Amino acid sequence: MNLEFVTEPALDPALMVCPHCGEEERIWIHSQQERRFKCASCQRTFAESRGTPLFNERYPNWVIILVLKLLASGCPVQAIVFGFELDERKVAEWQQAAGEHAQRVQQTHVCQEQLAGEQIQADELWSKTQFGPVWMATAMAVFSRLFIWGAVGVERQTWLMARVVAKLGAAVRRGVPILWVTDGYGGWEQAIRQVLRTPAYTGKPGRPQLRIWSELHLVQVVKRKAAGRLVGIERRLRISCWDVAQQLLCRTQTQLGVFNAACIERLNATFRTWMPALTRRSRMLTHRTNLRNRSSLTNYPQGLRYRPFSWLAGNWGANLHTEVGASVTIQLHPVSAVDLG
C-alpha cells in the first residue's frame, strides 16, 4: 500500500528565495536529509519550511498537513486528537498558524489591485459563543469565485464592514467599472461611502472634497418576509446607474439572471458546513471571542480551497509563496462551486 501523503516531495531550488538576502536564482540544495538549501550569494543555509506553518515543528510534515486537511474538511478537533494522539493545544496552534499564513498569502497576492471588471458580493453571518453572538463579514468575487477577505466582530456595525471594504479597495483595479451587490443591511453602503473615496483637488485652499469612486456601482437586494415566509424581493440601485450595472451583471455571470447575493450566501453556508462552531445551533459553542477569531482564520485556507484562480500567481494548486519567498508544501487543490454544491 502506497501512502503518497507520507512521501516528501523532491526538493526544487527554483521555487525558493533566500530569506536572508532575497536571492532568487543562485539557490542550491544543501542537505537532502535535513531538507535545507544554501544561498550562493550570502553563503547561508535555510530550511525548506522557512516562512510556513511547518517551520521549526518537531512533527513530520505529513502529519501537520494531514491534520490541516482534516480541519479544512470539517473534521472535529476531538476526533483528530483521538486518532493521532495529539494534544488539543497543539492542534489549535497549527490551525492558528495555518490561518495566519493563509491570511498573509491573501494579503500578498490578492490585495494587489488585480481584480478588474468583477462583481463583488458581500454578506455577513453570525454564530453563537458562550458570551453572546459574534458576527463575521465576508466578501468574494463572483466570476472567479475568489474569496477576498473576512473580518470578525462582536457587533454588526459599520466598522466591521469597513475592514472588509478596505481590503477590497486594495484588491480591485482603479479606473475599471466594478459591480458591488449586498443584502439590505445599510452598514455595507455606509462603509463603502466612508472608505472607497478619493479627494477631488480643485486648486483652492482648504481640505479637498472626498468623492466616492466613479467606477463603483452598488446594488442592494432587499428581501421582504411576512410570517417567516418570503413575499418579495426588491433591488435598489444605491450608487451609479442601472445601465452600467446591468452590463457588468451580464459580463460577470456565466448565466443570465438578476442581481442577487446567492454566491456569497452559498460560500457562508460552506463555511458553516466545514466549521461546526459556526453553525447556528451547535453544542460546540466557543468559550472566548479570540477563539472564534482564531477559527475565523480558517476561512482563508477554506477560501483558497474554495476557488483559487490561476492568473494571480501561477499554479496555486502546487505551491504558494510567502513574502519571505519560501515555498508552501501544503497542497490546496482548487474546487469549483459546482463541486461544493
Image (spheres, helix red, strand yellow):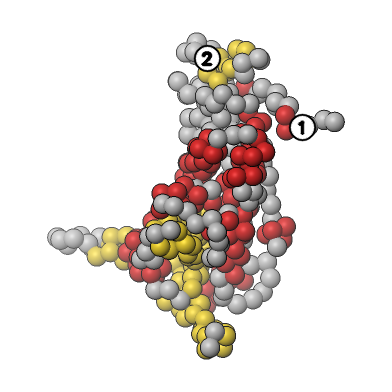
Mark 1 sits on what residue? 4
**Quadrant that contains the C terminus:** bottom right
Residue 98 location, x and y as percent? 53, 39
Residue 330 location, x and y as percent? 62, 36
Q: Residue furthest left?
A: 205
State the residue at coordinates (28%, 60%): 199
Residue 211 location, x and y as percent? 31, 66
Q: Quadrant of residue 4?
A: top right
Which mark is drawn over residue 337?
none
Q: Nearer the viewer, residue 10 or 66?
A: 66
State the residue at coordinates (59%, 70%): 262
State the residue at coordinates (35%, 69%): 190
Q: Residue furthest top?
A: 43
Marks 2/1: CA distance? 28 Å
Left or right position of 60 against 291: right
**Is residue 58 something one can see in this rendering?**
yes
Upstream in the sequence, badge 2 or badge 1? Answer: 1
State the residue at coordinates (61%, 54%): 274
- Mark nearest the camera among 2 and 1 is 1
Residue contact at pointers 2 and 1, CB within 8 angstroms: no
**Quadrant that contains the N terminus:** top right
Q: Residues within 10 Å of mark 2 (few under 14, many from 20)?
A: some
Mark 2 sits on what residue? 45
**Label 2 secondary element:** strand
Q: Name the amino acid, label 1.
A: Glu
Q: Name the amino acid, label 2.
A: Thr
